[in-house]
Image (cartoon, rainbow, N blue to C red):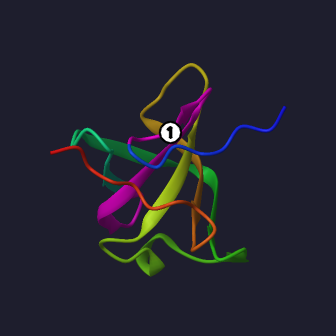
Amino acid sequence: MTRTPDTTHDKSHGNTTDGTVVAATGEKLTTTCGQGEKHEYTLAKNAKVTCDGEACKTADLKVGATVRVTTQTDDKTVATGVDCGTHIPAVVQKA
């Protein structure tokens, strides 16, 4: 059974979360989710960062872009992957 994405709130599927970039510098990434909550991540040394399927750097993640962040299972503040692009549904914040 295929599940249609619900874009009215953040997506938390296991260790992935969709959000909107607030800040991205060096090894730090800050996003907000559909509930308006801020999430801060430290990128793992081997974190894979992609923009529209191509390898990119944290500095390429623009404020306002929609991202899907994958975290370590045992530490949700350490990002092992960040995927940015139009294929990720926009995160709509609840009023």
Question: Image check: 86 left or right of 55?
Answer: left
Give the residue drawn at x 30%, y 53%. 30
Instruction: Identify which residue, 26 or 89, lies in the foreground.
Output: 89
Task: Identify the main secondary structure in magenta.
Answer: strand
User: Was residue 57 drawn as part of the magenta stretch in this picture?
Assistant: no
Question: Image check: 31 left or right of 43?
Answer: left
Residue 77's image quarter?
Answer: top left
| Residue 56 drawn above or below residue 10 | below
Q: Position of residue 27 (x, y in %)?
A: 42, 58
Instruction: Identify which residue, 81 or 31, lies in the foreground.
Output: 31
Q: Which residues are magenta?
A: 9-28
Q: Position of residue 76 (x, y in %)?
A: 47, 29
Instruction: Identify which residue, 6 or 74, lies in the foreground.
Output: 6
Residue under circle 1? 11
Q: Position of residue 70 (x, y in %)?
A: 59, 43
> Tag 1's secondary structure?
loop
| Residue 82 drawn above or below residue 16 | below
Image quarter in which the N terminus is found: top right
Question: Image check: 50 left or right of 27?
Answer: right
Instruction: Kindly identify the amino acid type of the residue bearing the numbered disc 1.
Output: Lys
